[in-house]
Image (cartoon, rainbow, N blue to C red):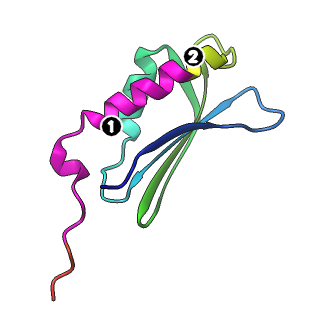
């Protein structure tokens, strides 16, 4: 199974935190689920980019707190943990490897 990576990417001169979620390309897009999870954490998405680069799917979310404040380092771990829980909760079929091509 492809490993899922959830990390914050440091960007110079930005008040926005860049959260990057990288999964296998066979995992369905997570944008809707990520939006809900971040809303529940009282985080707003300012910008979003989703792209498929087989064999990987990459979701990039630039985020801030609801009040517009930057995401503090202590909150980053909470956000990363919640996103990983979200991916782990996907039905097993959604994380299965793509079937081999037909001969």
Q: Which residue is mark 1?
A: 87
Q: Main secondary structure of the magenta part?
A: helix
Q: Is residue 87 magenta?
A: yes
**Who comes first in sequence, dot 1 or dot 2?**
2
> Image check: 23 left or right of 64?
left
Q: Which residue is mark 2?
A: 75
Q: Quadrant of residue 67 in the image?
A: top right
The structure residue drawn at horizontal position 57% and vertical position 13%, both measured from the top left corner, is 66
| SS type, badge 2 | helix
Residue at the right extreme, as displayed: 13
Which image quarter holds the C terminus?
bottom left
Q: Residues within 10 Å of mark 2 (few under 14, many from 20)?
A: few
Q: Quadrant of residue 7 in the image?
A: top right
Which image quarter holds the N terminus?
bottom left
Q: Position of residue 77 (x, y in %)?
A: 53, 22
Q: Which mark is residue 100?
A: none
The structure residue drawn at horizontal position 33% and vertical position 28%, both measured from the top left corner, is 85
Q: Position of residue 48 (x, y in %)?
A: 55, 41
Q: Position of residue 83 (x, y in %)?
A: 41, 30
Check contact, mark 1 vs mark 2: CB within 8 A.
no
Distance from Cα at disc 1 to Cα at disc 2: 19 Å
Q: Position of residue 101 (x, y in %)?
A: 21, 80
| SS type, badge 1 | helix
Q: Residues within 10 Å of mark 1 (few under 14, many from 20)?
A: some
The structure residue drawn at horizontal position 40% and vertical position 24%, both measured from the top left corner, is 82
Q: Is residue 93 magenta?
A: yes
Residue at the bottom extreme, as displayed: 103
User: In the figure, 29 relative to 86: above or below?
Assistant: below
> Image check: 21 left or right of 76?
left
User: In the figure, 92 relative to 24: above or below?
Assistant: above
The structure residue drawn at horizontal position 65% and vertical position 19%, both measured from the top left corner, is 73
Q: Which residues are magenta?
A: 77-99
């Amino acid at each position: 199974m492809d490993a899922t990576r959830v990390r914050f990417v440091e960007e110079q001169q930005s008040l926005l935190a860049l959260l990057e979620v990288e999964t296998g390309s066979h995992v369905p897009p997570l944008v809707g689920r990520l939006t809900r999870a971040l809303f529940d954490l009282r985080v707003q998405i300012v910008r979003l980019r989703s792209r498929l680069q087989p064999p990987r799917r990459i979701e990039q979310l630039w985020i801030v707190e609801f009040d517009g404040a930057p995401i503090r380092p202590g909150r980053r771990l909470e956000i990363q943990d919640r996103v990983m829980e979200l991916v782990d909760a996907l039905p097993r079929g959604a994380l299965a490897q793509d079937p081999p091509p037909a001969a």
